[in-house]
Amino acid sequence: MEPEKQNKSPASSTATPSSPEFGKPLSGWRLRCYTVIFEADTRAGRRFDLLLILMVLLSVALVMLESVGNLRGRYGPWLTGFEYFFTAAFTAEYVLRLLCVRKPLRYALSFYGIVDLMAVLPTYLAIFEPSLYALVDVRVLRLLRVFRILKLHAYMQEYISLGRALRASARKIFVFLSAVLMVVLIMGTVMFIVEGPEHGFTSIPVGVYWAITTLTTVGYGDLTPKSDLGRAIASLMMLMGWGVLAVPTGIVTAEMSAQRFQFPPKTTTRTCHECLTEGHLPDAKFCRNCGAKLPRYQAE
């Protein structure tokens, strides 16, 4: 038994990416489809994505037109037919994306994977609940791909920078919002005590609602303090609102400034086959996220 183990161990240590545990590698038609569908640096990929965005715009316009009663009554069958056509096209495209990637589940749970699924799901759900058909407008989120298609590297880089700045400042913003929540809770309670039900402040939640609308400088005007002390508190809340609105902006701006010099000068739409991370340099050999080997860069 011992020699058999020794003979089997080298074979297991020399497992290649073609082994079942790693999944079938991209090759042949899968690799060609992957390059066209996921990467916009090639002419075919850019044409595919431009066609996709055109279809998204047309389908969103279709939903808007169908919400107009006169047009729905006159061209209802045509609008329905076009909607079924767009849904079938988006469904086929979504299935093709799943077939092209090595790990379909990872793509399905990614941001773009969820958006692509939501682009087709409302039409099928509308068969059981017609009111859900209006959710088809979520397809407009797919227009985020315009940054990839037009190869606007500067805009794509700023988009990535903004996302990282928001993630980096998430804790600070959370602490700030917690402080704001405590302020509106305290001030709402104070206004409930000062003004009372006779002036419309019938409960503490109503006072908190007034504090939120005042602190955010919205001021609907449905609740207004009548006493001198209440008006003084309201004036203080309005002045605080100016500073409150500026704090999140300053936090995100500071993080964006810190992130500015942490990105390569030029990125592409090259996608890692393992983790689906985009934005690699043209001469990169390995993924900047998971370290997997990148395929050969295919540009125009």
Image (cartoon, rainbow, N blue to C red):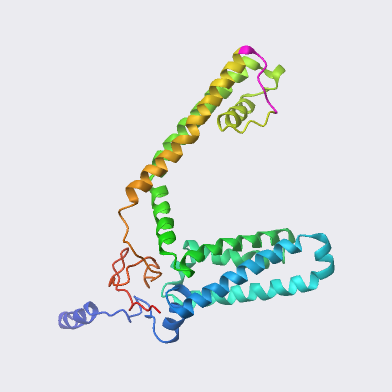
Q: Nearer the viewer, residue 96 or 38?
A: 38
Number of dots carrying numbers: 0
Quadrant of res 72: bottom right
Instruction: Give the residue drawn at x 32%, y 61%.
Output: 265
Q: Position of residue 95 (x, y in %)?
A: 54, 75
Instruction: Give the residue drawn at x 57%, y 18%.
Output: 233
**Which span of residues is magenta-colored?**
222-228
Is residue 185 visible to us here?
no
Q: Position of residue 64 (x, y in %)?
A: 71, 61
- Residue sitting farthest toward the top: 228
Query: In what quadrant of the picture does the C terminus appear?
Result: bottom left
Query: In what quadrant of the picture does the N terminus appear?
Result: bottom left
Residue 141 magenta = no
Q: Main secondary structure of the magenta part?
A: loop
Q: Position of residue 231 (x, y in %)?
A: 61, 17
Q: Nearer the viewer, residue 178 or 264?
A: 264
In this rendering, is residue 180 above or below 12? above
Q: Position of residue 97 (x, y in %)?
A: 50, 74
